[in-house]
Image: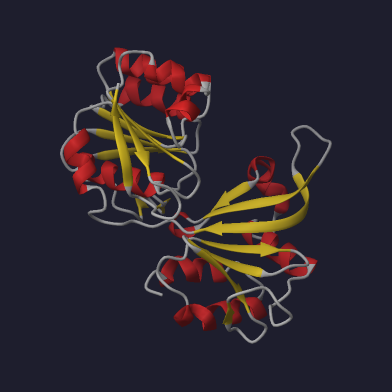
Amino acid sequence: MKDSTSYKVIADHMPDRLRKLLLGSADYLTDDLMEVRLHGGGAVCFVFPNRVSFLGKNGSIVASFSYDAYILDQEDIRECIDKLCHYSVHSCTKQLSEGFFVIGNGVRVGVSGIYSSSEPPVLTEFCSLNFRISRQVINCADRLFSETFDWNVIICGGVNSGKTTLLRELCRLNGNLRKTVLIDERNEIAAFCSGYPRNDVGAMTDIIGNCSRSQGIMSAIRTLSPELIVCDEIASSSDAEAIISGLACGVRFLVTAHGENEKEVSKRSELRTLTESGFFHKLVFLRGATAPGEVGRIVRL
């Protein structure tokens, strides 16, 4: 597969034997690989837009789960967690309370398991991990950029529909033309590391990360004089309130949200606040997980 760097980042967080099998299987995987999923007592799954495959005991790729599949034990899962935490679980309370890590190349790792009864609750027993590959696809948003430039836009779609990939490219295109601020709460978009973003998000793009969207938006408005603010996955009333404050100051916004159609969007109070504010111009609905990044409909508000 061509996206070997992210795949190697994932493999490097595995136990040694599993790491070797994964690296040996890379040539048999196609470039549209979206996720690598590990289940304790179960299999290693490779998720593509239209199919799921499994890792075989000998490093082969098998089309269906069978006795030939590599079966993970609890020690495999625990060693992955130790590597994600750099062998210091106590230093990763924030990640273990939120249930995810972000590692090299913007790969996001979701973790499932049993939460403690302490405050804040943190994961103490681990069941599975989902390594989700982050990709930069240059030129994937050219048409959408021309149809939405200088408008306030919400990009909507379901899980794995390509919202973040499109947003990253729109950020790059806008950031090459005007003052743009990217609120990258989980470092999935820019993949910021060692002082600079590993993904190209635009020559004039300022990045605010490791804080809530609402905090980042207000900080950007106060200190960076943005013409455009870009942020992913609007999910709370505080997000909506911060966006409305920015819009009232004349800042343009380009955001994403979960929702496959107008009905789903209208059921979420924070999105209803935005769409009924009179500030937003367009809703962009993506086609879905089988055609990630492809626009289905654009609705004028």
Nearest the viewer among 212 and 41 is 41
Nearest the viewer among 40 and 108 is 40
Which part of the image, by quadrant, shows the N terminus?
bottom left
Left or right position of 100 against 226: right
Q: x%, y% of residue 271? A: 45, 23
Q: x%, y% of residue 152? A: 28, 26
Rendered position, 247 above or below 160: above
Left or right position of 130 against 254: right
Picture quadrant of residue 45: bottom right
Q: x%, y% of residue 196? A: 34, 51
Q: x%, y% of residue 134? A: 43, 56
Which part of the image, by quadrant, shows the C terminus?
top left
Rendered position, 264 above or below 269: below
* Colour scheme of the rendered structure: secondary structure
Residue, far right: 117
Residue at 74% x, 67% y is 42
Residue, far bottom: 58
Rendered position, 293 above or below 61: above
Picture quadrant of residue 163: top left
Residue at 37% x, 14% y is 245
Total marks in image: 0
Nearest the viewer among 227 and 257 is 257
Left or right position of 166 against 51: left
Residue at 74% x, 80% y is 67
